[in-house]
């Protein structure tokens, strides 16, 4: 089963310290389990565009869809055996300390 880790910032997270950002260690652990995550960071929210079509008209606005102090910072898509397995891997991700990670199983269209 494939799971999305939606990585967001969080006001209640530990202060970010680059020296404690152990993402390389996390990726090595996930790779050692044979899971090869597909993910990346996202560019800053100031560079984002929100796209909507209403009544056949295109509306494009700058920034995220809502005024917020928390935002999506990155993602990972990982094969896991179960939701419990996915939660275990997410709990080891450095952004679980600095932000938060929403874990969702992918729901294929076909």
Image (spheres, rainbow, N blue to C red):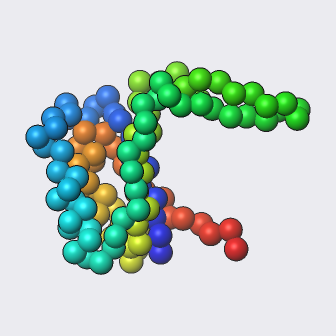
Q: Residue at x 26, y 71 (%)?
A: 31
Q: Residue at horizontal 20%, vertical 34%?
A: 16
Give above or below for 51 relative to 69: below
Q: Looking at the image, which residue is at 47% across and 75% down? A: 1
- As drawn, the residue found furthest toward the right would be 55
Can residue 64 be seen from the camera position used here? no
* Residue 65 % position (x, y): 59, 29
Q: Quadrant of residue 92?
A: bottom left
Q: In the rendered image of this protein, does residue 50 appear above or below residue 80?
A: above
Q: Residue at x 32, y 28 (%)?
A: 11
Q: Quadrant of the C terminus?
A: bottom right
Which residue is nearer to you in this view: 76 or 89? 76
The x, y position of residue 19, in whole percent, is 11, 40
On the image, the x and y values in percent for residue 41 come to 38, 45
Expressed as whole percent of the image width and height from the top left, the position of residue 53 reads: 79, 35
Camera-nearest residue between 107 and 58: 58
């Amino acid at each position: 089963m494939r799971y999305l880790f939606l990585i967001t910032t969080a006001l209640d997270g530990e202060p970010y310290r680059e020296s404690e950002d152990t993402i390389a260690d996390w990726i090595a652990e996930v790779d050692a389990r044979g899971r090869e995550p597909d993910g990346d960071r996202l560019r800053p929210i100031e560079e984002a565009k929100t796209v909507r079509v209403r009544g056949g008209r295109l509306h494009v606005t700058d920034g995220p869809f809502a005024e917020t102090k928390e935002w999506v910072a990155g993602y990972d898509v990982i094969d896991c055996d179960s939701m419990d397995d996915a939660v275990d891997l997410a709990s080891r991700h450095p952004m679980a300390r600095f932000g938060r990670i929403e874990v969702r199983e992918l729901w294929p269209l076909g």
